[in-house]
Image: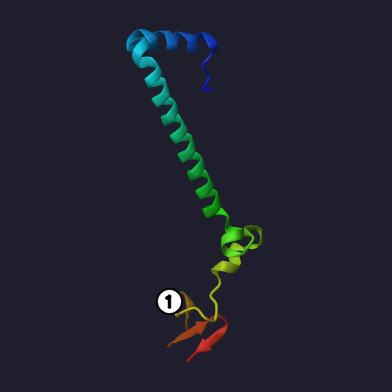
């Protein structure tokens, strides 16, 4: 319980009783319990949503361990042309796409 011992908890309850009085203390404790319950519920909901979003295997059908980063950097045949696909020759630039030359 967040590092509060029995004696510290008793002291906090005594201080709250002195500040709030015996009439308002039960209402305050009830309201505080609701706030803590809502905070825990929101935390659980956020944690579940983040776990679902991060689950790459379920969302994309791939296992992250099977991905080779070097393979992802290679251009594919269906990629659009970019300057990185261009090889410069002596007089004119030869355009390549993957391993094929584009004339």
Mark 1 closeness class: few <14, some 14–19, many ≥20 residues within 10 Å:
few
The residue wearing badge 1 is 83
Q: x and y percent of residue 58 in the render?
A: 60, 59
Marks counted in the figure total 1
Quadrant (top left, top right, bottom left, bottom right) of the N terminus: top right
Residues 103 and 5: in front is 5
11 on left or right of 1: left
Residue 23: percent from left, percent from top: 35, 13
Rendered view: 3 above or below 37: above
- In the rendered structure, the answer to whether residue 61 lies left or right of residue 37 reads right
Horizontally, is 46 left or right of 20 in the view? right
The foreground one among 11 and 34 is: 34
From the viewer's perspective, is residue 20 above or below residue 75?
above
The structure residue drawn at horizontal position 57% and vertical position 82%, both measured from the top left corner, is 99
Residue projecting furthest to the bottom: 103
> Is disc 1 placed on a helix, strand or loop?
helix
Residue found farthest to the front: 23
Residue at 53% across, 87% down = 101
Residue 85, compared with residue 11, is above or below; it is below
In the rendered image, which quarter is residue 33 located in?
Answer: top left
Residue at the extreme right of the image, as rendered: 66
Please provide percent x and percent y for residue 7: 52, 8
Q: Position of residue 77 (x, y in %)?
A: 54, 81
Q: Is residue 80 left or right of residue 51?
A: left
Question: Which of the colour schemes (rainbow, by chain, secondary structure, one colour) is used?
Answer: rainbow
Q: Foreground: 94 or 98?
A: 98
- The residue shown at (66%, 62%) is 66
């Amino acid at each position: 319980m967040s590092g509060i011992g029995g004696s510290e908890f008793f002291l906090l309850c005594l201080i709250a009783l002195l500040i709030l009085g015996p009439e308002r203390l039960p209402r305050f404790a009830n309201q505080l319990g609701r706030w803590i319950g809502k905070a825990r519920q929101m935390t659980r909901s956020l944690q579940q949503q983040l776990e679902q979003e991060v689950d790459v295997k379920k969302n994309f059908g791939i296992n992250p361990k099977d991905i080779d980063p070097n393979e992802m950097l290679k251009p594919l045949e269906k990629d659009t042309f970019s300057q990185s696909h261009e090889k410069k020759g002596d007089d004119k630039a030869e355009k390549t796409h993957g391993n094929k030359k584009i004339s």
